[in-house]
Image (tube, coloured by chain):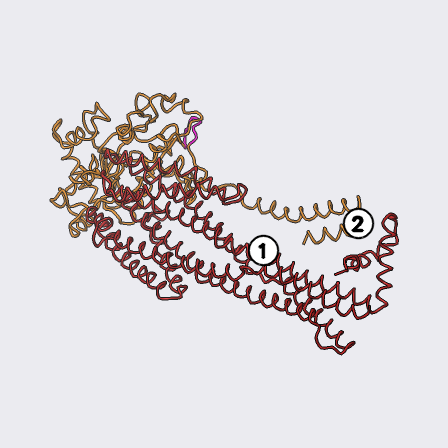
Amino acid sequence: MTRVKNRAARGRLHGWGGVTGMAVACVVTASLTLLPLAHGDGTFGGRSAGHDASASMPDRAETCKDPEASVPASDADGPSIEKIKQRGKLIAGVDQNSFQWGYRNPESRTLEGFDIDLVRAIAEDILGDRDAVIFRAIPTNQRIAALEHDKVDVVVRTMTINCERAGQVAFSTAYFQAGQQVLAPKESSIEGYDKSLKGKRVCTAEGSTAYDALNEESFGAVFRDEHDETGLDEDLLTVPNQLDCLVRLQLGEVDAVVTDNALAAGQAAQDPAVELKGDKPFTTEYYGVAAKLGADDLVARVNHVLDDYRRGGDDSPWMTSYREWLATGLPGITGPPAPKYRSN
Amino acid sequence: MTYPPSGTAPREPGTDRSSAPVTVPAQRGGVRTAAERLRAAATTEPGRLRIAGAALALLVVAFGAVTFLEISGRASSADDVVTRSQPLSADAARIYRSLADADTMAASGFLAGAQEPPDVLARYDADIKEASRLLVEAAASTDASTSSHREITTLSEQLPEYTGLVERARANNRQGLPLGGAYLRYANQKMTAELLPAAERLYAAETGRLAADSADARQFPFLSLGAGVVALAALVWMQRRNYRRTNRVFNHGLLAATAAAAVVLLWLAVGHTLARADLRSATVHGQESLDVLNKARINSLKARSNENLTLVARGAVLTPDGTDQYETDYSTGMKELGAQLRSAEELADDLTGSEPVGRAIDSVSEWQERHKKARTTDDRGEYDSALQQIIGPENSTGQSFERVDDALEKALAHEQDEFDAAAEDGRGALGGLPIGAAVLAVLGAAAAVVGVNRRLSEYR
């Protein structure tokens, strides 16, 4: 349309008249096409994605004072236990990429690690067979969804107990004390979770505690992908699995990784050129076994298993498993964290 | 024969008359006298004959020249189809396939354990070598300004990155470190998000060029045909005029000129129609089948890759709604593959073409059945058994995949032969036409002049 108009104008008017005519035509067409855009922009409003999540947070924090407190241990049967017994197999959501926690040994092709030992102990208690387990590998951001959709009975997957999650799943008593820590190359100028992170590219797993921690205080670190939490996520700084962070780190695409020290130790065990930075974790977290919200009979049973698991001092199953998998990466731990139970 | 001066003269007054009155003095006199002479000549019969003879010769020569130029263009496009754009398109398809195949092999070898099977390793190496070699060749035969060249650059830059990631995956896997699986997934991400799309765009660009060349060659030669009709009509008119004035039926020179022009016109019409038909058949029966089959093959490779990665990743990457990303990609790929094979079967126009496609379709359904079983096994938690059902030597999805791949390779080879034969025929149909048209036109023009001179001599 405009081109035709312009040509007509050029035909009628010559010299300056023509130029002016064209200029006028351009301005008119430009304003006509741009104006609706300017209006539309106004109606779109700001990004609202983050608002809902943060608005609901304080709510939960008020009702949740002590997320580590779980239902009292019991070996009584209930509907959830009954379901597992009928099936004859416990379905456990685990990780297969967490070295020393839950990982598939390519040589023996079996899953191994501290979490796997615990799952087997639960299966032995409920079903009398430590091999009566179906392991399902689930990624970090699907742990809760897998429980909600009944894809798994329990998640034993280095899962941190916190208030937000305590409203979505039922946690057992804590079976491990961990904390977020920074992992970086040994020569790196990064010293820990502090100002040395400024301007550095930091990798975290999508939906992880580490990501939330950076969201609250990042010390100027770059840690978000442009399209986080959408289908277009670039998977550069936030990745599906914490181990993907070590890949990015080795390739020089990120400068540091923030994750649980327990997982970070597993990463350091696979790469002698990186180490945990800072004296100790900058948070204190507890790992718990998660079950579907409301499956209190199963949680009580798991707590019962954990009681047995912790018992026995240095020769307890807990310490045996610790020495086998974790002592090299995380030395100096003398025993499991003490269980906390709800008073009511 | 004694004509040249007035042979060129008739055109100039025609163009000059409108703008003549203005200046430019020097040559004006010459032109004006020539124009006056021509006007004077047109008043006598010998003069009119001279002018008509010149015009006839000119028309016949022009017909020959236009035919020569136009058909040379068509013939060179047809030649491009056979010797340039089809091979380049086939090479682009081969680059695309090699890359997809390499990715499939990398995942298969990885799944087999720390010690990768030698045949899988060898196939991966061959794929990478072929892709690198073809990229170098393609770079040499593409213009630096084209989009194809951009894609080739992207591919050449990314390929070493990809192989680097695969090597890291292997090194870590060999040590039993789970990091290997993470590297393999990253390599696959590079392949599917960057390399394969670039290869696909390259293939599309080269195939587009092939279609354009073929369309150019098939374009109807309107100018030549028009010129031929005009020349023939003028010759007939001249002979009719002769007949009316002299009552003589035949003038040998003019008759020969008419024959020459008619032969050229016929040759032109038949030759190009044949070439059109052949090139069209190459496009319809060959290229369209090749295109669908190439895409089907890529999809089968991608599906196989995703199937393998489902076992490597085991839920490490999920879609937003919580299903396994690789399994979802496998399903979409297989669906596309099925649709493409069905349309390939429809396109196949003989038994040799449809037989391998039919086999591929059967193998695909076998593959899907086995895949479903393997998934159920894996979901039960029996990883080892599921692994055997995927990469084992017998009754595995891997076996079905190989069958699909073999069948598609056969079908592709057949369609390529069909294309080559038809395109070669099309190119042949235009062979000799430009030169023949030029020679016949010159002879025809000469004959026309001789014929008119014969009439003219009667006035001396």
Q: Residues within 10 Å of mark 1 (few under 14, many from 20)?
A: some
**Position in image of residue B207 (x %, y %):** 48, 53
Residue B432 shown left or right of residue B456 in the figure? left
Which chain is the one coloured orange? A
Residue B81, visible in the rendered structure: yes
Residue B184 shown left or right of residue A224 in the figure? left
- Chain ID at mark 1: B
User: What color is chain B drawn in?
Assistant: red
Amino acid of disc 1: Gly
Amino acid of disc 2: Leu
Dots 1 and 2 on the same chain: no
Residue A99 drawn above or below residue A52: above
Quarter the N terminus of chain B occupies: bottom right
Q: CA distance from mark 1 to mark 2?
A: 42 Å
Q: Residues within 10 Å of mark 2 (few under 14, many from 20)?
A: some
- Residue designated by label 2: A13
Magenta residue check for A220: yes
Q: Nearer the viewer, residue B328 or A141?
A: B328
Residue B217 drawn above or below residue A194: below
Q: Specify the segment rendered in magenta.
A: A215-222
Residue A64, visible in the rendered structure: no
Quarter the C terminus of chain B occupies: bottom right
- Chain ID at mark 2: A
Q: Nearer the viewer, mark 1 or mark 2?
A: 1
**Position in image of residue A211 (x %, y %):** 37, 34
- Residue designated by label 1: B73
Q: Nearer the viewer, residue B243 or A145?
A: B243
Residue A22 shown left or right of residue B109 in the figure? right
* Label 1: element kind: helix
Q: Nearer the viewer, residue A39 or A79?
A: A39
> Residue A54's image quarter?
top left
Magenta residue check for B140: no
